[in-house]
Amino acid sequence: MGYTVIIAEKPSVAASIAKIVGANTPHREKANGYLEGNGYKVTWAFGHLVGLKNPEDMGFGGETLPIMPEKWETQVIKSPKADLAAMTNKQMKVIDGLFGGADRIIVATDAGREGELIFRYIYEYLGCRTPFDRLWISSLTDEAIRKGMASLLGGRQMNALSQAAHARSEADWLVGFNASRALRLSSGSKKNLSLGRVQTPVLVMITQRYEENKNFVPTPYWQVTGIAVKGQTGIPVVSVHHYQTEAEAVDAMGRVKNQGSFKVNKVETKDVTSKPPLLHDLTSLQRIANSKYGLTAEETLKIAQSLYEKKYMTYPRTGSRYVPEDVFATIPGLIAKVAAYDRDSFRAASHSLQGKKLCRRSVDDSKVTDHHALLPTEVIPKDLSGNEQKIWELVCGRMLEAFGENSISKRTTVELESAFIPFKISGSVMVYPGWKAVFGAAEAADEEKKGKTEGQGNEDDTPDAGQIPPLKEGENLPATKLETVRKTDNPPAIYTDSSLLGEMETCGKKIDDEELREQMKDIGLGTPATRAAIIEVLIRRGYVSRTGKKLIPTELGMEIAHIVKGRKIADVRTTGEWERELSRIENGKASKESFDQNIRKYVLDIIEDLRTNCKPLDGMNASSEPVRTCPVCGHKMVNRKYDVFCDDTQGGCGMKINREIAGKKLPVTAINQLAEGKTTGTVKGFKSKAGKAFDAKLTVNREAKKVEFVFNESRPTADLTGKTCPCCGQPMSNDTWKLTCGCGFTLFKAYGQVPLTESEIDKLLEGKAVPKAGMKSKAGKSFNAKLVVNKQEKKIDFIFDKK
């Protein structure tokens, strides 16, 4: 009798599914790369295990253009680290053996374009012919898995999605490799420069906005302000006119002083109804998390993915802000569950909505594609980290808002005049908070205001006076505290993750209305699932840096943006149209073959465009510095103007050594030491963000692939093999600095610059707490704490004694 293989995207997801189907293998057997029982063998990938080969591996040498494979070839993705490469190859052999002996395969990779591609590349690489079905679920709760297993989709139903996934992968390969090589050859650079189908238009957007901000010349204007007195109440008023000179404003103020009063010409009061907002998709969640908490788009995605895998939230990589009718039927039950959550406003909202007719603004079957909008599951969390709690509350709170009642406020506008000069007053008072009570009316109003002003333009000059006392047309109010106020128009704001995500969603068009934004989504740059990665790629390439919330182009990024600006590779609209075409392939309304032909023609146009118009790239030619080897992966590093880089487009790991750190230009000897994996001697003259000078050594953090300060150097010495992961029971890989597991758990051999002994490592892996004294913070301060394994988040936590 045969068996059924279920393949998930990660070991943790596989474990959740195995539990439901009865694949209850003893704990020690997880090391074999799968779980089994009840006729099932449940295995997993580690994300992308198979990908397209690089040009050189398909016979296209370094000077060849165009690069146009007739037949696509794939390979097991190579890791620069020997232990990870061995783990990947081992898991592929496991999958190969399981697929070969199975009667049927159930695909349980993430239910989306990239999840489908992960499976299809593995399936095609192995030449497998075993029939397969698709598990398509939007949450990992036990009930969702059971329902999904009871209603599996046929593999053929996913063919259009598979075609779109392959088309996207191949298009990015064709555009990226051809454009990057064309730029390098045309600019005369000796470096491996990187361009991409989506990343390059986004780089140009970031650079253009930065330059608009820096080159902006503000135009000053003046207004007259004052206080109109009604009884014991002072009401702030402001002139309607913007005076172009201070002298004009002073003259107007003098005339009002002589008049001594404001005459009320018109009073208008009306109720303003604010409809509940739409539910969150990934992009809107990332935007609000960035604006409210300063979380990057990538951080928010990782947290949302963690909440999904912990069964607290539905599938995060969604581009829809709507739910279908069948999901809407479950909303009353979800709202009732929230009454058990420990937040007063959530409990109050839950109780107030029970038994009431819910708002249907976010209900529309026709606007739900692969996955519906983000929702909490019926599992109410009690063990979240700080950032997990923030993201879960944003999703849960938005559900309460979206299905809540209209908010009603009373807005009063008053027109006045003095000495024939018009003034105005505006004030609003909340009548019924409705949906705005979930996070508080003030916070809701602040978020609405941010959404409308985050980009460019001026805010309303009229201050909100709040409660305006009753006024009658024709009455005169004494005028006091008159003054002139100088103002300027505002420059376009430098992009943050939030504002950039918003404009990537609509191809650079600034749109405040959320329903109109929805209509523009099909011609956006990238997808909700990829936009965070695009931003991080630009940062990793050294083209953009993140300063606070702001995304600032580097000198290198600006050089490249100037070269490609106006070229086909930087055409925002064309890139958005390709994304729309991919969506049409996914929905069976367009063919992959036609898309591929158009992309290949587009690539030829890009090559010719760059060959004809590209100018030499300043400062990018090879220097006289020695060739260096990456301290992380051993790959050859390239010497660039602003850094020394292990090029991850050419098989490297992306490690970068900046030539200037904390305001200090590094001596070549220090760069050489870092490239050799050594800790430098003390380098003097660094400057903190507060402007304070400090001295420190530098070393390479191999795990984070970055250079770090060392204030009290300690190198771990433990060399361990055969250790078992406390989270999943698999053998852990060992290197100089850490123990790692394929499930994501990492145990470093030193914390706070203090090495762990082998006995302390054993205690941690056994689930015991280990006290450590004399550890150092990044600021150099000593502290004591206990170390303990956090199995849920797969990391080491510090536990401090309460004083």
Image: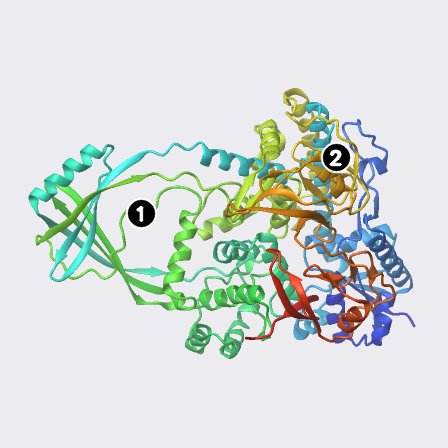
Residue at 47% x, 69% y is 400
On the question of residue 262 being in view, the answer is yes
Q: Please identify the quadrant where the C terminus is shown.
A: bottom right
Residue with the mark numbered 1: 460
Q: Residue type at mark 1: give it.
A: Asp
On the question of residue 310 being in view, the answer is no
Q: Classify 185 as above or below 759.
A: above
Horizontally, is 102 left or right of 442 in the view? right
Residue 152 picture quarter: bottom right
**Circle number at residue 133:** none
Q: Which element carries disc 1, helix, strand or loop?
A: loop
Residue with the mark numbered 2: 638
Image x and y of residue 175, in percent: 70, 35
Front label number (1 vs 2):
2
Upstream in sequence: badge 1 or badge 2: 1
Foreground residue among 416 and 542: 542
Q: Please identify the quadrant where the N terminus is shown.
A: bottom right
Horizontally, is 167 left or right of 459 in the view? right
Q: Residue type at mark 2: give it.
A: Val
Image x and y of residue 318, in percent: 60, 57
Mark 2 crowdedness (10 Å alpha carbons): few <14, some 14-19, many ≥20: many
Foreground residue among 705 and 652: 705
